[in-house]
Amino acid sequence: MYKKILISMSLDHGYGDRAIEMARALSAEGGEIFAVHVYEALQGTASTYVSEEDVEKALAHANTRIVERVENVSGVKPVLLTGHSGRALTDYATKVGADCILIGAHKPGLRDFFLGSTAARIVRHAPCSVHVLR
């Protein structure tokens, strides 16, 4: 059983309810569960066409959505991070001393056939156990 579980919560995929249920099943009595969403900034030249104000609005909206997603779920703490998803999640797991990351794997493209790119990166670099939901 795990004492600190991070659930990777992509706000545009439907793994949230299943992931929370699984985290509860894997959690030790008194364990902590964190629902973590990573806001990724626009890449490359696309970022030059978006104002800082719009970025701040999008970040605030993402924060509102992650809070709303778990506000009626007892014992789950919402967390919003910024950066690259795989790196931000593994860094945060190290920072809080997580002993498990729970992540969903979507149907990937040919390049990442067995896992999605974020799930694959987390499996390779996590400082703790990783459970992948399919």
Image: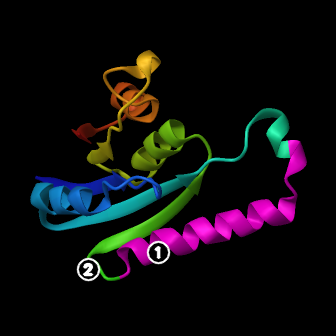
Q: Earlier in the sequence, mark 1 or mark 2?
A: 1
The answer to whether 109 is drawn above or below residue 92 in the figure is above
Residue sitting at x 40%, y 29%? 108
The amino acid marked with disc number 2 is: Ser
The amino acid marked with disc number 1 is: Val
The answer to whether 86 is drawn above or below residue 63 in the figure is above
Q: Which corner quadrant holds the C terminus?
A: top left
Instruction: Report the residue marked by disc 1.
Output: 67
* Residue range highlighted in magenta: 48-71
Question: Looking at the picture, how far across and down is residue 116, in whole percent?
Answer: 40, 31
Local crowd size for mark 1, using a 10 Å CA cut-off: few (<14), some (14–19), many (≥20): some
Question: Looking at the picture, how far across and down is residue 52, in whole percent?
Answer: 85, 59
Query: Which quadrant holds residue 4?
Result: bottom left
In this picture the colour scheme is: rainbow
Q: Nearer the viewer, residue 74 or 18?
A: 18
Q: Is residue 11 toward the left or the right of residue 104 in the image?
A: right
Residue sitting at x 56%, y 56%? 81
Q: Secondary structure at mark 2?
A: loop
Query: Which quadrant holds residue 44?
Result: top right
Single out the residue that lies furthest toward the bottom: 72
Q: CA distance from mark 1 to mark 2?
A: 12 Å
Q: Nearer the viewer, residue 131 or 97?
A: 131
Question: Looking at the picture, how far across and down is residue 100, in whole percent?
Answer: 26, 46
Residue sitting at x 48%, y 56%? 37
Instruction: Report the residue marked by disc 2.
Output: 74
Q: Is residue 46 toward the left or the right of residue 62 in the image?
A: right
- The rendered magenta stretch, by its main secondary structure, is classed as helix
Local crowd size for mark 2, using a 10 Å CA cut-off: few (<14), some (14–19), many (≥20): few
Q: Nearer the viewer, residue 108 or 118?
A: 108
